[in-house]
Image: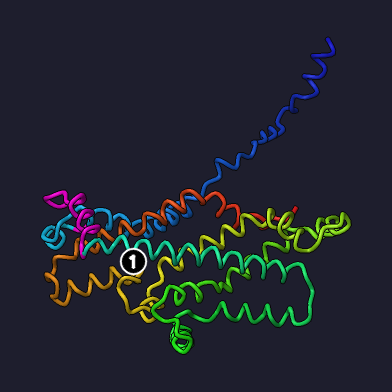
Amino acid sequence: MTATDVRVADAAPAPGAPRPRSRRTYDPAKRRSTLLTVLLALCALYFLFPFVWLVIASTKDNEDLFSTFGLWFGHHFSLVENVRTVFTAQGGIFLRWMGNTILYAGVSALGAAALATMAGYAFARYQFFGSKILFSTVLGAVMVPLTALAIPTYLLFSNAGLTDTPLAIILPSLVSPFGVFLIRVYAADAVPESLIEAARVDGAGELRIFWQVSLRLLGPAVLTVFLFALVATWNNYFLPLIMLSSSELYPITVGLAQWQSTSTTGGGGSQALFSTVITGALVSILPLVVAFLYLQRYWQTGLATGSVKE
């Protein structure tokens, strides 16, 4: 008997003994939950349903809009005609509304991201008198609904003579308590204290440390705050409604609501603007879709980084 035969005989199980169970390698890709998949599919349908309806409704004229099934196309494909009407109605004022919205949302998002980054970084990396009280105040401000502050804000801006101006929309939108909270939590883990101390030892000042060292590490969180502020200002309706009285200064939300009101009250051609309003709503969300598709990788990174400590 050779040595190989001896090893095989030793490895073979004894007669009547149970065979050892084979070990299965764990593959995370094969681990799926049917219930979770179904729930996520339902959530996706819930969020995509309004968008699908909006796209289909934008291809219909006024007659098909009210006489055909809402989730299927009408007898006439009128998307091109509807888009043309959107950009030519009332002398092409929709382009002015779109420009106003881009101005308000862009400036507000940049300003809110900058202020929230500086404030959140200061709360995370500096200890000063009253810092805990101030941060608690910021957390409390997150709980206050914006509609509750609309009337006091209007009275304040009215006394300052800033109503019916772009500043009436931009200045209130610069304040982002949630952005400060998000940057503070992110900076506490993303910017190590040892890195700041090393920069100080090398002779760098606090401002230089912030701009050249810390800000690069805070990039994903800054983009996250920027996206949140951009969407919030873009979709803001109540604040521009009470602050602005000139139609030339309206954002898209208030302008489309004005068209909708004109259609329902019978002025300006009764129902002639219904398909125009729906198509205008579709056109108005396209810049946000493009922004999210382009910046979603940074947005996802900003939410996920720091969630797991090594």
Residue 244 is inside the magenta segment: no
On the image, the x and y values in percent for residue 108 come to 50, 67
The residue at 34%/66% (across/down) is 252
Residue lying furthest front in this view? 161
First to last magenta residue range: 70-90
Residue 183: name its quadrant. Answer: bottom right
On the image, the x and y values in percent for residue 226 come to 54, 61
Between residue 28 and residue 214, name the one nearer to us.
214
Residue 240: name its quadrant. Answer: bottom left
The residue at 56%/68% (across/down) is 112
Mark count: 1
Horizontal relation, residue 201 to residue 282: left or right: right
The residue at 40%/67% (across/down) is 235
Horizontal relation, residue 46 to residue 258: left or right: right
On the image, the x and y values in percent for residue 298 come to 57, 51
Horizontal relation, residue 262 to residue 38: left or right: left
Neighbour tally class for label 1: few under 14, some 14-19, many 20 plus, Cα within 10 Å = many
Kindly identify which residue carries mark 1. 252
> Which amino acid, mark 1?
Ile
